[in-house]
Image (tube, rainbow, N blue to C red):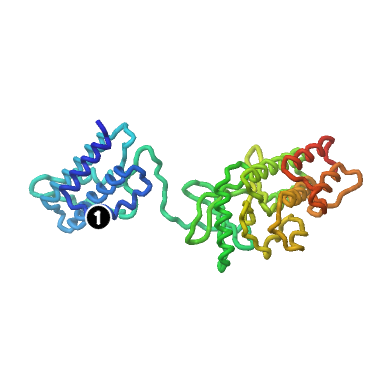
Amino acid sequence: MDRLKYIEQKLLEWNNSIELSNKDLYSTNYEAIENLIMKELFSVYHSLLFWHFANINSALRNLHYWADPSRDFIHIIDEYENVCRALINTEYEFSITEYYSVVIEKCKLFLDSSGGSPIPEEFEKIVLKEYEAIFSLKNTVRVNDVMKAYELKMIGDGSYANVYKYKDEFYNKTFALKKAKVDLEDKEIIRFKEEFNEMNKLNSPYVLEVYKFNVDDLEYTMEYADITMDKYILSNNDKVKFSQRISFVRQVFKGLDYIHSQGLLHRDISTTNILLKIYHDVEVIKISDFGLVKRKNSNLTSLSTEFKGSLNDPKLAMYGNFKDYKIEHETFALTRLIYFIMTGRKKIKLKPNSTLNEFINKGISDKISERYSSIVEIREAFEQSIVGKWIP
């Protein structure tokens, strides 16, 4: 038996025999159902059941449900259960929420096809959830989509957005929320949205994951990381092992290499934009804050906030030519980040005979043509510099 044809036939019977004025009202509850036939079936059943539930609530004062609607409701329940049985073990198998399943069973106990139905005194008024889905396909997961307020704790702020964290009770998991500041200029709002869009396209364990953008409140939910590289190194500099520092640098290489492969330049590499997610057995870096990211042919550049807290080449700000930012500027900032990770110092101060002198000097050379021109090149130079163990 063609199950969809069977359902279509049942829908045709309902539409021809009963006035379903509220069907469309409930269809919005099932927007997530891709199959249009099942979506209509759920809307029809929702309408039919709630019509009778509402009338039974009205009849509670007299504890009597009239004869004609009683017979009609018995017929609806019979047809509903027949359809349920026909779809068992198929891709269209569905269920109703437990609350309404219990309500239907209680109604079946008192419904009578002749003379009306006496409603028991203990029968409680039925709660009508008009704007929630009460049916779901068996091959889907039911997620609590009711908007719920969670307490936000600020964990960071930037030039155009604040970052908060909150504990989601449904997932029992901590998430981060990046919320645009009020009174942003149109160009800043565009950049905020573009940051989310670009991050949402990326898929790497070394790039912070973003989940959902809220257009109304100008905010988006994202993966929560435990600490910034800045705070981690400064708080644990005496404890961080040499091998651990090397692991961090190599992870940064992998993350930036992936970002560059997607046609992007980060343009705001800093000790606070590299985050750490701490697991029981490993720490994983997460590259974040793509507010200044540049894709080819993009002209969105604002010089007023570009350099705050970053490791960028100061000459870019001095000469106001940030629009000319290229890979050699990215490796300049990356070199300074590597120096910080390996030494715990932000201000570069090289010592005589240090094994890192050549590596650092090339990366921050005043002559752009002498700098590293790719992640591959700077990674190879770094690996060479640690062969005999990096001496800071």
The image shows residue 190 at horizontal and vertical percentages of 56, 60
The image shows residue 389 at horizontal and vertical percentages of 83, 37
Quarter of the N terminus within the rendering: top left
Residue 177 located left or right of residue 136: right
* Residue for badge 1: 22
Q: Observer-nearest residue: 315 or 160? A: 315
The relative height of residue 101 versus residue 214 in the rendered view (above or below) is above
Quarter of the C terminus within the rendering: top right
Residue at the extreme left of the image, as rendered:
115
Residue 114 located left or right of residue 195: left
At mark 1, the secondary structure is loop
Q: Observer-nearest residue: 56 or 177? A: 177
The reply to whether residue 392 is visible in this rendering is no
Q: Observer-nearest residue: 24 or 296? A: 296
User: Which residue is located at x 61 percent, y 56 percent?
Assistant: 298
Q: Observer-nearest residue: 325 or 42? A: 325
Total numbered labels placed on residues in the image: 1
Residue 151 located left or right of residue 390: left
The image shows residue 380 at horizontal and vertical percentages of 77, 38
What crowding class fits label 1: few (fewer than 14 Cα within 10 Å), some (14-19), or many (20 or more)?
some
Residue at the extreme right of the image, as rendered:
352
The reply to whether residue 369 is visible in this rendering is yes
User: Which residue is located at x 50 percent, y 61 percent?
Assistant: 217
Amino acid type at circle 1 is: Asn
Q: Quadrant of residue 245?
A: top right
Residue at the extreme bottom of the image, as rendered:
183
The image shows residue 229 at horizontal and vertical percentages of 70, 49
User: Which residue is located at x 67 percent, y 45 percent?
Assistant: 256
